[in-house]
Image: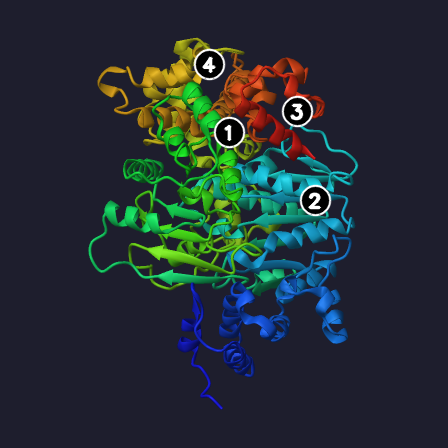
């Protein structure tokens, strides 16, 4: 009998050209690994490598199938070929009320049955685990009338909504706070939308995706506070919860007891990630180009920021990289006309290279991911926005930078990035190519700030908690705000995520100068330039305080907002950025992304919430002094909808660019009722509309995704 293969020898058996050892010897070695519990994770790895070479095993394939079932890989099993014992095990892993081909692997089934029994679950598992499939299975039971799914980004709203549209016969899928609920609903919200929702119906089951963001106070405090507030609000309604995210080391002691939940941590993965070490010499773009030339399967190229992604895409274009995929000429033509003909996004697309980052319009970001998953582009140059839960079918991930912006990635983020290689049912083995040494191996501890309430927990979060849920120390901190004369606690709470002390400082300034400044506050509807300049100056001084999203001063914010308001055509705004004197953008790429970043970050998020904070504060202070006050709600709503009908900006999340939405606005028969717009959209005969081929493609896909 031949000497058993070692683990290293086993890994070497699986070559691109085929197996280098006898199939029976390989399977025997895997079987011996399964004989000891300590080696099951290695055995799973070898089984996945073998499954990728399934055709090379010939008659021995039945042994491979048996080994796969032994480690719980039931989704890969051929049900018709199972013996009675294995068929019974297979059926135990099939969830209720799902299609017959839908079956869980061993660990998925364990989580599913805990949730089915009513337990709360916090799941920490690898990217390829299939965490979202458990959500679908719980929804399919129809035992919950109202469900909330909280996703980390707006990009994930559309992906989640499209997936859950399979349940639209039983549930209304709601993605905007303006949509009235039906009898049975699934709310797919970001944390900010969950907080902004005036009243949920009773939520009996809720999900927090990427729950580790609960503890990321140093990354984006406002968004983290919103996520904590959303979790707290849903938990207070006593709904069952399922928190899911990638691998972490631990959660705070006492969380499981306090929230009656089970922390389920596993390294069970359905793909193998093969890491290729960085070159010993200093990296260069030429090295990256040389690697990409060799990669003929779907490949993500991770970069630290949007400008760096543009730089990499330009280098690939200049090097003559072309993926040889179906023509994108219609898309390229539309992108050039709508934004700028020399924008690298369109030029790259023509070569089968996609770009994905957080400054893109949501409809274009969705289109580029869909094109990648449909093999219409081969390479996707991306930033961290694609790493945060968006599903792709990449075989390869190239980690070109080891930073996000200027911050080095930690081991947790690195795991999240490399976890994008391989995909269940797509690629059994994924490749990760490094150009820098990986970070030190240390998984994070994830804090639950509204539970731990230590000295670093922001006051903006603590003020949102009921007094009974505050620790003794937190109650002492909150006494200051409860007894505050300058500004009521109710207004402080309405201005969620904004530091209470900053709000009080602004209220005190207004009170001290009320008699001389009231007329500068007392506007309604639309401001003059001076009104806008005044309010921007205040929100900058008291709330912003520093350069944010490439805006460096209140004057610049005022000017850009005014220009945005009075120039609705995107292409013209981009040309204006190129002709701004010494402050002009140096390239079309810079101009496009300045415009898109301001639109996304300032107009669509930060400016409306800051405007409303100033509006509420000045109204309470001036009304208390019996002086006329203003109301900025109309203007703030217009800013948030980018000075367009609200349904037009909402449809961007459904895959319809605003420029296309404006063309079909008459067919929607509404300016502000999203449900009416969606109903009318589904009746459109796209073939009869006078639109470009690319616009018809986008519109058709959006209609198909409504459900």
Q: Is tag 4's residue or tag 1's residue first in the polypeptide sequence?
A: 1
Residue 443 position, x and y percent, is 43, 62
Q: Report crowding for label 2: few under 14, some 14 to 19, many 20 or more residues within 10 A (C-alpha).
A: many
In which quadrant of the rendered image does the C terminus lie?
Answer: top right
Residue depth check, mark 4 versus mark 1: number of the one nearer the observer: 4
Secondary structure category for the residue under label 4: loop
Q: Report crowding for label 1: few under 14, some 14 to 19, many 20 or more residues within 10 A (C-alpha).
A: many
Residue position for label 2:
147
Residue position for label 1:
487
Q: CA distance from mark 4 to mark 3?
A: 21 Å
Residue depth check, mark 3 versus mark 2: number of the one nearer the observer: 3
Q: Which mark is residue 674?
A: 3
Q: CA distance from mark 2 to mark 4?
A: 37 Å
Frontmost residue, 379 versus 118? 379
Q: CA distance from mark 4 to mark 1?
A: 37 Å
Whether 527 is drawn above or below 227: the answer is: above
Residue depth check, mark 2 versus mark 4: number of the one nearer the observer: 4
């Amino acid at each position: 009998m031949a000497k058993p293969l070692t683990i290293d020898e086993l890994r070497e058996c699986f070559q691109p050209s085929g197996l280098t050892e006898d199939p029976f010897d390989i399977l025997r070695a895997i079987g011996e690994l399964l004989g000891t519990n300590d080696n099951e994770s290695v055995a799973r790895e070898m089984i996945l490598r073998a499954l990728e070479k399934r055709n090379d095993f010939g008659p021995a394939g039945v042994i491979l199938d048996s080994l796969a079932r032994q480690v719980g890989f039931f989704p890969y099993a051929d049900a018709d070929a199972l013996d009675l014992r294995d068929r019974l095990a297979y059926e135990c892993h099939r969830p209720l009320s799902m299609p017959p081909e839908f079956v869980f692997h061993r660990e998925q089934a364990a989580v599913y049955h805990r949730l089915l029994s009513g337990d709360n679950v916090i799941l920490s598992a690898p990217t390829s685990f299939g965490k979202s499939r458990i959500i679908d299975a719980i929804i399919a039971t129809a035992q919950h009338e109202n469900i909330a799914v909280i996703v980390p980004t707006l990009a994930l709203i559309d992906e989640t909504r499209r997936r859950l549209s399979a349940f639209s016969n039983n549930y209304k899928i709601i993605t905007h706070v303006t949509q009235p609920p039906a009898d049975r609903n699934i709310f797919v919200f970001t944390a900010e939308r969950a907080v902004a929702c005036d009243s949920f119906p009773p939520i009996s089951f809720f999900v927090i995706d990427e729950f580790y963001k609960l503890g990321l106070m140093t990354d984006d405090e406002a968004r983290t506070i919103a996520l904590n507030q959303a979790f707290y609000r849903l938990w207070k309604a006593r709904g069952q919860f399922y928190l899911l995210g990638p691998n972490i080391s631990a959660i705070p002691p006492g969380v499981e007891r306090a929230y009656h939940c089970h922390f389920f941590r596993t390294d069970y993965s359905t793909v193998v990630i093969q890491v290729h070490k960085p070159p010993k010499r200093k990296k260069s773009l030429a090295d990256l180009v040389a690697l990409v030339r060799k990669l003929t399967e779907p490949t993500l190229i991770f970069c630290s920021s949007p400008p760096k992604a543009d730089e990499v895409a330009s280098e690939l274009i200049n090097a003559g990289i072309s993926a040889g995929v179906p023509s994108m000429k219609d898309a390229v033509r539309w992108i050039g006309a709508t934004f700028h003909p020399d924008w690298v996004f369109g030029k790259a697309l023509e070569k089968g290279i996609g770009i994905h980052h957080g400054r893109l319009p949501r409809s274009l970001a969705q289109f580029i991911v869909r094109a990648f998953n449909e093999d219409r582009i081969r390479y996707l140059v991306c930033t961290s926005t694609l790493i945060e839960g968006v599903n792709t079918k990449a075989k390869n991930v190239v980690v070109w930078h080891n930073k996000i912006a200027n911050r080095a990635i930690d081991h947790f983020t690195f795991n999240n990035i490399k976890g994008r290689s391989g995909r269940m049912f797509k690629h059994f083995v994924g490749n990760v190519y490094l150009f820098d040494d990986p970070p030190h191996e240390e998984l994070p501890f994830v804090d639950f700030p509204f539970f731990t309430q230590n000295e670093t927990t922001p006051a903006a979060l603590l003020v949102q908690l009921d007094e009974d849920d505050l620790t003794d120390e937190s109650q002492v901190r909150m006494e200051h705000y409860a007894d505050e004369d300058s500004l009521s606690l109710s207004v402080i709470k309405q201005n969620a995520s904004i530091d209470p002390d900053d709000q009080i400082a602004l209220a005190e300034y207004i009170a001290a100068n009320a008699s001389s400044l009231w007329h500068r506050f007392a506007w309604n509807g639309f401001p003059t330039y001076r009104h806008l300049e005044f309010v921007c100056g205040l929100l900058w001084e008291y709330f912003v305080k520093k350069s944010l999203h490439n805006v460096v001063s209140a004057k610049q914010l005022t000017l850009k907002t005014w220009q945005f308001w009075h120039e609705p055509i995107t292409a013209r705004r981009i040309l204006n950025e190129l002709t701004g004197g010494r402050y002009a953008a140096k390239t079309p790429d810079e101009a496009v992304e300045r415009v898109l970043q301001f639109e996304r970050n300032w107009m669509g998020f930060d400016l409306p919430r800051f405007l409303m904070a100033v509006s509420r504060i000045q109204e309470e202070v001036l009304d208390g002094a019996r002086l006329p006050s203003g109301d900025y709600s109309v203007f703030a709503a217009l800013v948030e909808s980018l000075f367009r009908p609200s349904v037009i900006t909402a449809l961007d999340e459904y895959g319809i660019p605003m420029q296309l939405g404006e063309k079909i606005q008459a067919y929607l028969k509404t300016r502000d009722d999203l449900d009416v717009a969606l109903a009318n959209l589904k009746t459109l005969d796209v073939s009869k509309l006078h639109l470009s081929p690319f616009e018809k493609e986008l519109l058709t896909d959006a209609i198909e995704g409504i459900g």
